Image: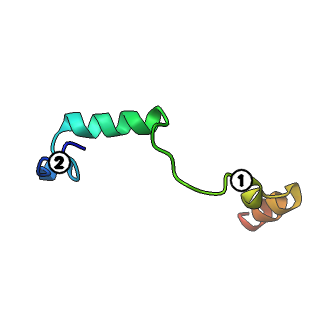
Amino acid sequence: MCKHPAIVKYRPFCSKRCADLDLGKWLNESYVVGGSGNDDENDFSSDQVIEIDQLDR
């Protein structure tokens, strides 16, 4: 974040402050992971959920 050398304890950050600033950006959605934005391709049908549940038993 600030380009200072990383300290092992906070790696890859130089300090707790920089680590907290980075976390804050993720929590405030300043950072996002790229993608198609279509979550439907990962949704399971109710039949698939039942099958998976039965396999776990």
Q: Position of residue 38 (x, y in %)?
A: 72, 54
> Reading the chain from its start, which is encountered first: label 1 or label 2?
2
Could you tell me which secondary element the residue under label 2 belongs to?
loop
9 and 30: which is toward the camera: 30
Residue tagged 1: 39
For label 1, count other residues whose C-alpha is less than 10 Å away and answer few (under 14), some (14-19) or many (20+): few
Residue 13, how many percent across, how many down? Answer: 21, 47
Left/right placement of residue 14 relative to residue 47 reads: left
Q: Residue at x 60, y 57 (%)?
A: 35
Residue at the bottom extreme of this rendering: 55
**12 vs 29: above or below:** below
Q: Spatial distance from mark 1 to mark 2, Cα to Cα?
A: 35 Å
Residue at figure coordinates x 86%, y 55% from the top left: 46
In the drawing, does residue 40 fall left or right of residue 8?
right
The residue shown at (23%, 53%) is 12
Q: In which quadrant of the rendered view does residue 56 lie?
A: bottom right
* Quadrant showing the C terminus: bottom right
Identified at 17% across, 48% down, the residue is 3
Residue behind mark 2 = 3
Local secondary structure at mark 1? helix
Q: Position of residue 52 (x, y in %)?
A: 76, 64
| Image mark count | 2
Report the amino acid beneath label 1. Asp
Frontmost of labels 1 and 2 is: 2
Q: Position of residue 10 (x, y in %)?
A: 19, 46
Residue at the right extreme of this rendering = 47
2 shown above or below 53: above
Mark 2: amino acid: Lys
Image side of residue 14 versus residue 53, left or right: left
Numbered tag placed on residue 21 in the rendering: none
